[in-house]
Amino acid sequence: MSKQLELPDGVERRMVEMDVRSSEDDQPILEGTAAVFDTVAEIMPGFFEQIKPGAFSKVLKTDDTRALFNHSSDFPLGRKSAGTLELRQDAKGLHYKIDLPDTQIGRDLPVSIKRGDITGRVITRECFHRVPGSTCGTCSMRRTD
């Protein structure tokens, strides 16, 4: 099950696994599945979420999504408009591929992942509902006691 951290401003983060590989020209690539559809995840103690297929359709068409290290705009890893971040959605979930930059963090990150120092990646998204049992049409949240 994915792990979830809750932030006080209503932004949620979900931990997901990732893989590092090299492109044909030996540039490091980070890729994985950012969200798996129809999988229940505990997003905070006692609260569970399930993302529905198609949940990212609008964002994929309209947003200039960025991949950031530690959620900091000081450490960009890839950007959709720059062609260094690819996002695609299929029946399983939302998948990403990042062509890592030739920067210090871009060189250090694959090493830390391969060593096992960094074992997952966190996706951040806004949550538009906070009431247990509520739904926004793309995900649902329920409380278990």
Image (cartoon, rainbow, N blue to C red):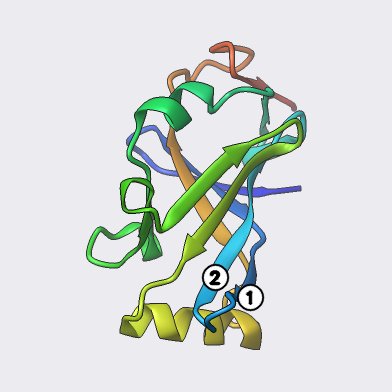
Residue occupying the point 43% across, 20% down: 128
- Determine whether 75 is above or below 28 in the image: above
Horizontal side of residue 51 vs 111, given as left or right: right
Percent x, y for residue 10? Answer: 38, 32
Residues 75 and 23: in front is: 23
Between the C-alphas of marks 2 and 1, the distance is 5 Å
Query: What residue sits right under mark 2 in the picture?
Result: 29
The single residue placed furthest to the front in the displayed view is 24
- Quick one: label 2 or label 1, which is nearer the N terminus? 1
Residue occupying the point 40% across, 58% down: 84
On the rendered image, what quadrant is the C terminus found in? top right
Q: Quadrant of residue 43?
A: top right
Q: Is residue 54 visible?
A: yes
- Label 2 Cα neighbours within 10 Å, binned few <14 / some 14-19 / many ≥20: some
Horizontal side of residue 104 vs 117, given as left or right: left
Contact between labelled residues 1 and 2, with CB atoms less than 8 Å apart: yes
Residue occupying the point 53% across, 28% down: 56
> What type is the residue that disc 2 sits on?
Ile
What secondary structure is found at the residue carrying circle 1?
strand
Percent x, y for residue 135? Answer: 59, 12
> What type is the residue that disc 1 sits on?
Arg
Query: What residue sits right under mark 1 in the picture?
Result: 21
Percent x, y for residue 139? Answer: 61, 21
